[in-house]
Image (tube, grey):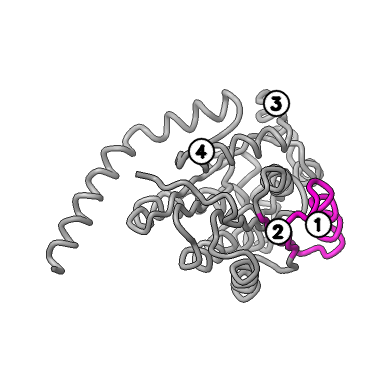
């Protein structure tokens, strides 16, 4: 049975100085939970920290500058959070970048940057956070609706988010024995600074394909993600369009996870 997270167990959110990450931090601080946010931009971090501290008197907030592509930065953020607030309750791999464009025109650097930030940044947090969780730990990955279906214009972005989804699928099985719940979110287009930046390079055909799903507020998306994580729900999205894609691609999942649990149990018996 999934254990609840102690109310004072801290949350660590990468990319927490804006967008969905900041919206999640605001909701958690409102609930009285200690929160650490990380980000690369010192000025944005200072502004975000001030906003979070304005929500509640004596709010327990840390803002730590760091880059998710650097494992040492993530380990420092985890260690500092544990030293200050105690074992982790939530670790949310939210930091991400998106730069769409035509595959033939995009430099290889765009592909590498998005893979390093979106996938390896998530991997670094998972590796550092897993040993630091207390009872009922929740590990949350922010993937994308673009990780459910191939979308023209996202040849650099979508593979990195498909990789995040794959990591979440594996850790869902592997970390269950540790009592750690894994949630992966597939947000639709969300009203964030990143979406504004995407529009600068997004091909017109991509805009036409995606605009029918609408744009959701960061607050609504953040609320749905946190609610799913607290329940121990594996997948979450906001809006009907992405939800349909999410359901369709997961039809065989329950049977395959059951087979894996049988294999894990058999392996454990042979080691006794």
Earlier sequence position, callout 3 versus callout 2: 2
Residue 15 on the magenta span: no
Instruction: Judge depth for marks 3 and 2 and give the one in front.
Output: 2
Earlier sequence position, callout 3 versus callout 1: 1
Earlier sequence position, callout 3 versus callout 4: 4
Residue matched to label 3:
214
Q: How crowded is the residue under tag 1: few (<14 C-alpha within 10 Å), some, or many (20+)?
A: many
Earlier sequence position, callout 4 versus callout 1: 1
CB of mark 3 within 8 Å of CB of mark 4?
A: no
Residue matched to label 4:
148
Distance of label 1 from label 2 (alpha carbons): 8 Å
Instruction: Judge depth for marks 4 and 1 and give the one in front.
Output: 1
Residue matched to label 2:
37
CB of mark 3 within 8 Å of CB of mark 2?
A: no
CB of mark 1 within 8 Å of CB of mark 2?
A: yes
CB of mark 4 within 8 Å of CB of mark 2?
A: no
Q: What secondary structure is marked by label 4?
A: loop
Residue drawn at x 46%, y 39% as measured from the top left: 233
116, above or below 186, in the image: below
Q: Pick the quarter of the image with the N terminus.
A: top left
Q: Is residue 202 left or right of residue 77?
A: right
Magenta span of residues: 34-63
Distance of label 3 from label 2 (alpha carbons): 28 Å
Residue drawn at x 68%, y 48% as measured from the top left: 32
């Amino acid at each position: 049975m999934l254990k609840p997270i102690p109310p004072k167990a801290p949350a660590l959110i990468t990319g927490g100085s804006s967008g969905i990450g900041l919206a999640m931090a605001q909701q958690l601080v409102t609930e009285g939970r200690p929160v650490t946010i990380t980000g690369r931009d010192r000025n944005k971090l200072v502004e975000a920290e001030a906003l979070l501290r304005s929500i509640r008197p004596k709010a327990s907030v840390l803002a730590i500058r760091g880059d998710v592509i650097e494992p040492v930065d993530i380990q420092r953020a985890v260690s500092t959070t544990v030293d200050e607030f105690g074992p982790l309750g939530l670790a949310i791999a939210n930091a991400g970048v998106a730069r769409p464009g035509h595959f033939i025109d995009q430099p290889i650097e765009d592909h590498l940057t998005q893979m390093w930030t979106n996938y390896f940044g998530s991997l670094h947090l998972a590796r550092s956070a897993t040993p630091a969780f207390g009872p009922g730990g929740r590990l949350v990955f922010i993937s994308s609706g673009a990780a459910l279906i191939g979308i023209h214009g996202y040849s650099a972005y979508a593979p990195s988010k498909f990789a995040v989804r794959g990591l979440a699928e594996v850790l869902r099985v592997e970390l269950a024995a540790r009592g750690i719940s894994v949630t992966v979110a597939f947000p639709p287009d969300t009203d964030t600074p990143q979406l504004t930046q995407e529009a600068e390079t997004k091909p017109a055909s991509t805009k036409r394909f995606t605009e029918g799903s609408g744009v959701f507020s960061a607050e609504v998306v953040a609320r749905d993600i946190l609610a799913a994580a607290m329940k121990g729900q594996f997948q979450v999205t906001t809006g009907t369009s992405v939800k349909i894609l999410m359901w369709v691609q997961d039809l065989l999942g329950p049977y395959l996870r059951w087979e894996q649990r049988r294999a894990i149990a058999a392996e454990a018996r042979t080691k006794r």
